[in-house]
Every structure is written in C-alpha cells, then in structure tokens.
Image (tube, helix red, strand yellow):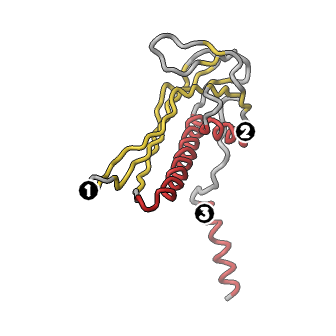
C-alpha cells in the first residue's frame, strides 16, 4: 500500500513535467534600464517600480531632464532619454484615472450598485525616440453593491478593489514590457 502511494506521488511531477508545465518565472526584458516618466506621487508607478526592482535585471532610473510635449499632445511631460549601449527605454504614463459610475438604482431612486474603473494610458519609447509600444490604454473594472447601512465597510471594500485593480494593471504592464523584444 505504501509503495502504491509512493508511486502515485512520484508520478504526478513526471506527468506535469511531460505536459510542459513549469512555474512562472520572472520576466526577461530586452532592455537594461527604464526611465519611469510619471508623477512621483502615483501609487501605480510606485508599485511598478517595486516590481521592476524585485526582478533584479532592470535598473529603474529617474528622469534627468524633461522636455515639453508639442501642442495637442497628452498632458504628461516627456523625459529626455539619452542613448546608451545596453538598451535604455522610457515608459511615459500619459493618463491614470479612477472612475466610479452608478450602474444600478432601486425603485426609490437610491444607488444600489457602482462600477469602479481604473484606466491608464502609456507608451514605451527607445532611447532614439522610436515607439516600442504605441500609446495603449489598459482598463480594469469591478462591480460593487452599495448599502447605506454599511457605508464605512463599503468604502473599505472600494479601496481594496482599487488596490486589486492597480495590481492587475501593474501585472499587465509587466507582461507587455516583457513582450518587447527589440530595443
């Protein structure tokens, strides 16, 4: 009986390895350093910086000088990225927006349900100015019910959902940065 259990417990890793299963590894980036061109107070950028630094393969740099955008462009300034060997890129966070939209009301006109949205627009540029990732928008949304009797609990739940959406956006951003193959 013990041999049968031992055989079954040894067979599981062999079968998983045979089907191509492997644990998710840290992303491998095509660049050595990245300039995060965004407001320093952005919690999303702070979490992205921590994720990139935890990877250990990419150096996160602060923008040294900022050049204004041409008229009609997005409102975020553009960091000047000097070309260096080894591949330096700049991530421009063009917009970071949190929205709370009413999606349901009851018969007496009171709010019953909200939809929380977290939206970012960004682009990735190489040191020579080429766009590696053109302007892209990522969106996360969550539904939350509302109850006037539990307002404080619902505010805490809302904050938790926004943090969850922010983590999802950072993970999506990390996957998109890892998908860039040429700098």
Q: Earlier in the sequence, mark 2 or mark 3?
A: 3
Label at residue 87: none
Q: Observer-nearest residue: 73 or 180?
A: 73
Q: Quadrant of the C terminus?
A: top right
Q: Residue sitting at 49 percent across and 25 percent down?
A: 134
Q: Observer-nearest residue: 171 or 21?
A: 171
For residue 129, above or below residue 119? above
Q: Earlier in the sequence, mark 2 or mark 1?
A: 2
For residue 19, above or below residue 118? below
Q: Residue sitting at 66 percent across and 48 percent down?
A: 25
Element type at mark 1: loop
Mark 2 or 3, closer to the camera: 2
- Cα–Cα span, label 3 and label 1: 56 Å
Q: Observer-nearest residue: 158 or 120?
A: 158
Q: Which residue is mark 2?
A: 53
Which residue ends up furthest to the top in the rendered image? 71
Element type at mark 3: helix
Label at residue 16: 3
Label at residue 108: 1
């Amino acid at each position: 009986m013990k041999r049968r259990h031992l055989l079954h417990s040894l067979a599981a890793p062999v079968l998983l390895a045979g089907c191509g299963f492997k644990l998710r590894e840290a992303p491998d980036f095509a660049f050595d350093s990245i300039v995060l061109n965004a407001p320093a107070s952005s919690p999303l950028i702070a979490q992205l910086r921590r994720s990139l630094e935890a990877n250990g393969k990419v150096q996160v740099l602060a923008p040294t000088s900022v050049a204004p955008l041409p008229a009609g462009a997005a409102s975020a300034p553009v960091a000047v990225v000097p070309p260096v060997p080894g591949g330096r890129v700049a991530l421009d966070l063009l917009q970071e927006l949190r929205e709370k939209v009413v999606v349901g009301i009851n018969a007496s006109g009171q709010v019953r349900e909200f939809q929380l949205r977290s939206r970012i627009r960004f682009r990735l540029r190489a040191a020579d100015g080429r766009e590696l990732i053109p302007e892209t928008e990522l969106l996360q949304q969550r539904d939350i019910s509302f109850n006037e009797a539990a307002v404080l609990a619902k505010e805490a739940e809302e904050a938790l959902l926004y943090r969850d959406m922010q983590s999802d956006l950072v993970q999506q951003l990390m996957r998109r940065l890892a998908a860039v193959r040429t700098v």
